[in-house]
Amino acid sequence: MRTQLVLAILLLSLVLLSTGCGFFNQPGKTAQEVHREHIRILRVNQQQMMRDVDRWLGFDQPSKLTDMKLN
């Protein structure tokens, strides 16, 4: 009896690991919510990349140039 239970748990674990949670119907998010989340993630990633590029090019520091016109 015990070996059958262990075998059943092992088989169930193997099935769940191979299919993942996408196998079951999850009503947690609609397609529009998932799309908005993906768009937000892409926008945040782009902002972070631009911040890194600005830091690498030195645009994140204030300019040391004067705004006064010298004669």
Image (cartoon, grey):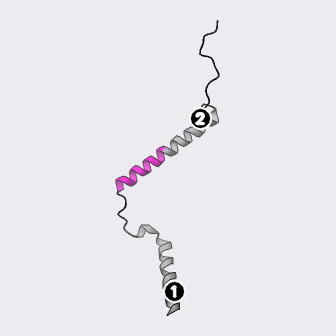
Is the residue 42 above or below the residue 25 in the image?
above
Residue 66, horizontal then vertical, whole percent? 62, 17
Amino acid carrying mark 1 in the image: Leu
Q: Quadrant of the C terminus?
A: top right
Most foreground residue, 46 or 70 = 70
- Residue at 52% over, 41% down: 47
| Magenta segment main secondary structure | helix
Relative to residue 8, is residue 62 drawn left or right? right
Residue 67, horizontal then vertical, whole percent? 59, 16
Amino acid carrying mark 2 in the image: Asp
Residue 52, horizontal then vertical, whole percent? 59, 40
Give the alpha-carbon distance from disc 2 to disc 1, as whole Å. 57 Å
- Residue at 65% over, 22% down: 64
Is the residue 71 above or below the residue 13 in the image?
above
- From the image, tell me which residue sits under label 2: 54
Task: Mark 2 or mark 1: name the one nearer the start of the chain.
Answer: 1
- From the image, tell me which residue sits under label 1: 7
Question: Looking at this rendering, what residue extends furthest in the bottom direction?
Answer: 1
Asked if the residue under mark 1 is in contact with the one under mark 2, i.e. CB atoms within 8 Å, the reply is: no
- Residue at 35% over, 63% down: 27
**Magenta stretch encompasses residue 56:** no
Q: Secondary structure at mark 2?
A: helix
Is the residue 49 above or below the residue 9 in the image?
above
**How many C-alpha atoms fall within 10 Å of the one at disc 2: few (<14), some, or many (≥20)?**
few
- Residue at 59% over, 35% down: 54
Is the residue 48 above or below the residue 20 in the image?
above
Q: Give the residues in magenta.
A: 28-43
